[in-house]
Image (cartoon, grey):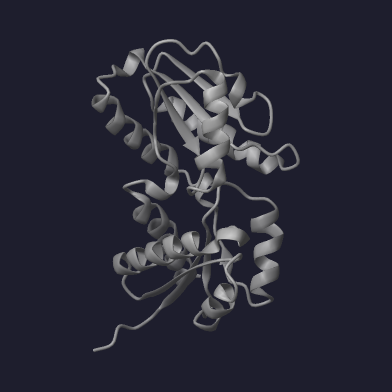
Amino acid sequence: MAQVTDHHALIDAAGKPSDSGAMETTLYGLAAQVFASLRGWAVYGATLAAPGAIERAKAGLERSLIFPFCRAPGWFVDMCLPNRLGPDTGKILVPLGCDPGLPAHSRDMLLKIRPLGGLDAEETAVLLAADGSPRCPESSDAVRQFSVALKRQLLTRCFHLGYVKELPLLRDMTGIDGPAICVPFFAAGGGHVKHEAPEALTQAGFSGAGVPSFIRYSGLVGLVALPLERAGRDRRVA
C-alpha cells in the first residue's frame, strides 16, 4: 500500500553559486533522513544557488512548510526565499539557528568533545564564533539569544563571543588561557567554517578544540523533523 502524503516540506538554504553541488547534495541527503523519520510526509531539499533546484522542488510541493537551513532571519528568509518560491509559498518556519532546541544540541556536542581531550567542564573556556552582519540586526539577535541559552546550560569557567565581521572581532579574542573549546554558530561547512573563522582563530592565537557546524550535529535530523511535525500538527488542528 502506498504511503499517504499528508504534508509537504522543503529544507532550503542559500547555497554558493560557485560551488552549489556540495550543499545541494548535503540537503538532499538530509531531506531523505527527515523523510524517513516522518510518516505521511514528502520532504525535499534544495538550495537557491543550484540551477533549477528550487523549480524542481516546487513541482512536487503542495501547501508546503519551508524550513530555512540557515542561522537567522534576514534578507534570505524574509525576501529572497519568498520571491523565489512565488505567491504560493507555504509557511516559512523559524530558521535553524533560532530553534529553541539548538543550544541543547550544541551543549551535547560540546560535552562529547570534552572527555576526548581530558577537559574538565568547570575548567574549560568556551568561545562562540559567529559570522556577524552589521547590516542585519536579526543575525546578531539570533547569536546573542543562542549565546545566552547555551551559557545557561554549561558549567564553564568563562564564555566568550567573537564575530568574523563585527565587534567584538573573533581575531581579537586573545588571551584565552587554559583548556578551551570553540563552538561555531554556522549552519554548514562553507567558506566561513573552512577559511574565515579558522584564520581569525589563528590570528587570536586560539589553540583549543572545536565543535563542528550544525550540519554535522548528531541530532540534526530531529532538530529539523520536530518543528516540521509540530507545524503540520498545528495546521491540521486549524
Instruction: Please identify the residue farthest to the bottom as the structure is shown.
Output: 1
**Residue shown at the point (57%, 68%) measured from the top left:** 50
Q: Is residue 14 visible?
A: no
Image quarter for residue 6?
A: bottom left
**Residue shown at the point (45%, 25%) measured from the top left:** 151
Residue 64 locus on image (x, y percent): 52, 73
Q: Is residue 161 visible?
A: yes
* In front of the other: 41 or 29: 29
Residue 213 locus on image (x, y percent): 44, 42
222 shown above or below 49: above
Q: Is residue 118 left or right of residue 152?
A: left
Residue 161 locus on image (x, y percent): 55, 25
155 shown above or below 135: above
50 shown above or below 205: below
**Residue shown at the point (71%, 39%) measured from the top left:** 137
Q: How many marks?
A: 0
* In front of the other: 138 or 163: 163
Q: Is residue 23 left or right of residue 80?
A: left
* In front of the other: 228 or 204: 204
* In front of the other: 169 or 63: 169
**Residue shown at the point (51%, 18%) measured from the top left:** 205
Image quarter for residue 123?
A: top left
Residue 172 locus on image (x, y percent): 61, 19
Instruction: Please identify the residue farthest to the right as the structure is shown.
Output: 135
Q: Quadrant of the N terminus?
A: bottom left
